[in-house]
Amino acid sequence: MSERATRPPTLNEVADVAGASKTSVSRYFGGERARLSPALQARIAAAASQLGFSPNLMARGLKGGHSKLIGMLVADIRNPFSVAVMHSVEQACRRHGYSLMLCNTDNDPAQERAHLDLLSAYRVEGLVINPAGSSQPALDALAAQRIPTVLLDRRLDHALADVVGLDNALAIDMALDHLEAQGYAQVFYLSEPVAQVSSREQRLARFHDGSRQRCLKEEVYHHSPDNAEAPLHAALDAFMQRAGPAPKAVLCANGNMTLAALRAFQALAIRPGDTGLMGIDELDWCALVDPGITTLAQPTKAIGHTAVDCLVKRLTNPTSATTDIQHPPTLLPRGSTQPPSPSRPFSSASLGH
Amino acid sequence: MSERATRPPTLNEVADVAGASKTSVSRYFGGERARLSPALQARIAAAASQLGFSPNLMARGLKGGHSKLIGMLVADIRNPFSVAVMHSVEQACRRHGYSLMLCNTDNDPAQERAHLDLLSAYRVEGLVINPAGSSQPALDALAAQRIPTVLLDRRLDHALADVVGLDNALAIDMALDHLEAQGYAQVFYLSEPVAQVSSREQRLARFHDGSRQRCLKEEVYHHSPDNAEAPLHAALDAFMQRAGPAPKAVLCANGNMTLAALRAFQALAIRPGDTGLMGIDELDWCALVDPGITTLAQPTKAIGHTAVDCLVKRLTNPTSATTDIQHPPTLLPRGSTQPPSPSRPFSSASLGH
DNA sequence: GCATAAAATGGGAACGTTACCATCGTAGTC
DNA sequence: GACTACGATGGTAACGTTCCCATTTTATGC
């Protein structure tokens, strides 16, 4: 209908066409329709749709201070766990009437800081952060602004922010319980270097405690996905040789480690199941790869929703105490923790799930 | 240093502290530092850092009309291909000084329309869209605003937008060449229902032409990931029975189909390689699953970069003709297209790559 | 029927920034 | 040494909203 929509129509123009005041039009679009007479509402609606008007959220954000924006910082956008949480965060934001502004830091503290500045420049009302390795830059920026923040997965000691993530202790307990129940008695724990990441610390600590409690023979190996895999293969091989005859298993602290472990299994020609293999984080291929890889799926949907819930709660009530919410994982048992039964030494273990 | 940073400092306050005019401060932060004397620059820098000032991008966007935002609409955020492109788009945006506002439509045209409205309300300067199934709502909104748009992967007939994606004809040619070279002579083509999606149309059309050219026996099956897989399994089984003795292969039109095909192989106890299997889209697990799945990797990085390049080009020169840029895929040969050699009928085919 | 309240509407003044034009020195040119 | 030109600054008016207050209209009570 519009001849040449060079510049989007403004509230003022709608007011003119509708024969109303800008205030009324503002009310119409600002959720105060109830205060307007049906006649006026109709006129405004007609004028707006004729002109194709939509309120300029920049202007709105400027005046009222409500950007209706939530910023999210993801350490690695290509990590399926991050993506899943992201998806859920976005849904939750929309449900609360917010939009998501997403930034990926590629695990680079410099980018993390830059993006944080950017988000605060856009005056986001809240922040969901999956912190990259180094926490310090983030902290500074957070302290400077007074922006409510939720930390995903990783706790930052000095930050006054809510934390939402996996119940790491429970996850390790479930893993050890499952391995024990399946008859494995010696466990090789594969984790990235702890590097002061709280979730890694918690998992590792619980692994030690839990192994001792259950009288499992334990061994820990730290592997960085950036490094060559040869040392890992050697370490696993050594474990296989050295360890006693009791059934052995490998427990992976996250998805990357599960991937590395699987490659190690292939390199050493170990069949998952004969030696147990399970990991935290569920991935597409875990059900596909030969006997199926047993995993503990993180409740990504709950994590994302909860994070946003915390945020909006703090947005309405900024003074409430910070919380630390831990969600339980789900065990997905598959063939990789099915030891060969004596009767059928090389059974085609059930595909689980 | 600031006592109680209740509200972020404004340009005006910086001007006061620095003993300068707001114009000068604006120039300092607006990239016109060169016009300011070194003395003034120093005073402003000091005042700004003391106050912890950062320009309010909402206000800037309002005044100048430059939101410095680019919007991206993704049909399915959980699709690895989309994520990879997203990652690359975000990098490219940042390099050009833009920020990315990301929306996920979950393949729902209603959400697509809602998000489009939202993005235009934030006055994004450009749009990168991976259209969901139905194109109509998107079109309307696009036409109304005058926002430069780049379409990913799918062409929309009536839209005056640049298109960036895979060279579908080349991809199919490469696939058929590879299959033929490996000795496969009968090809089962597995695709989602075409449903007017341009990329699917192009791939299918070229498959027909290419098969005829190469004298390959062809068969086409359409499978929707939403539906049960039993019919697919039956169809594949029938193909296996009916087809002659010449080596057979399955060609999958995208990652979802590769997944479905692999499950069908498992259900029918077909070993990939004995019957060839390859697909468009490279996924994490393709190298992991038994003999390795041969794929054509999409150049996601190039696609994302090119999309943003197109956008900024059109931003500076809105009248240039629309382009359609097609990037070539990369063949990753693996065991699944390695037919058993007569001498070693069940060789552990090379893992490729 | 008049005072009064309540509802419905309108008119500015902000919000924090940039764009435009005006002002001021200060040096260069004849 | 006055005129020009240019580099460095400052002032003011927008940008499109919302908020606060003033005004008009309509319903309510006696």
Image (tube, coloured by chain):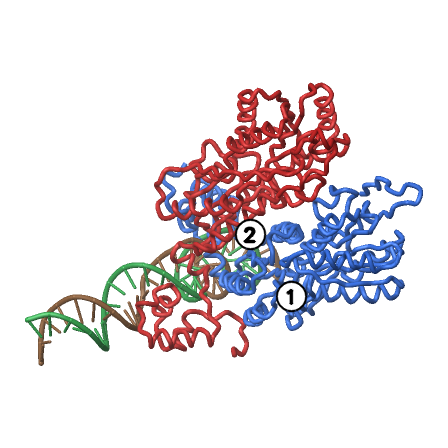
Chain colours: A red, B blue, C brown, D green
Viewer-proximal residue, B194 or B165?
B194
Estimate how packed mark 2 is, as few (under 14), some (14 to 19) or many (20 or more) residues with alpha carbons within 10 Å. Answer: few
Q: Is residue A196 left or right of residue D21?
A: right
Q: Quarter-wise, where is residue A297 in the image?
A: top right
Q: Is residue B112 above or below residue A13?
A: above
Q: Nearer the viewer, residue B271 or A28?
A: B271
* Secondary structure of the residue carrying numbered label 2: loop
Splitting the image into 4 quarters, where does residue B245 fall? bottom right
Secondary element at tag 1: loop
Residue B331 in the image, given as x and y percentages of width and height: 80, 51
Q: Position of residue A348 (x, y in %)?
A: 72, 38
Check the image and name the residue furthest to the front. A343
Which residue is tagged 2?
B31
Tell me, yes or no, if residue A153 can be seen here.
yes
Gap between marks 1 and 2, in whole Å? 22 Å
* Residue at 44% from the left image edge and 69% from the top image edge: A10
Q: Position of residue B330 (x, y in %)?
A: 79, 51
Please give the chain letter of the residue carrying mark 1.
B
Residue B64 appears in the picture as rendered: no
Q: Residue furthest right?
A: B343
Position of D15 compared to A23: left or right? right
Question: In terms of depth relative to the viewer, which is nearer, A274 or B213?
Answer: A274
Q: Which residue is mark 1?
A: B317
C14 and A202: which one is in front?
A202
In this picture, is A115 found above or below C2? above
Amino acid carrying label 1: it is: Asn
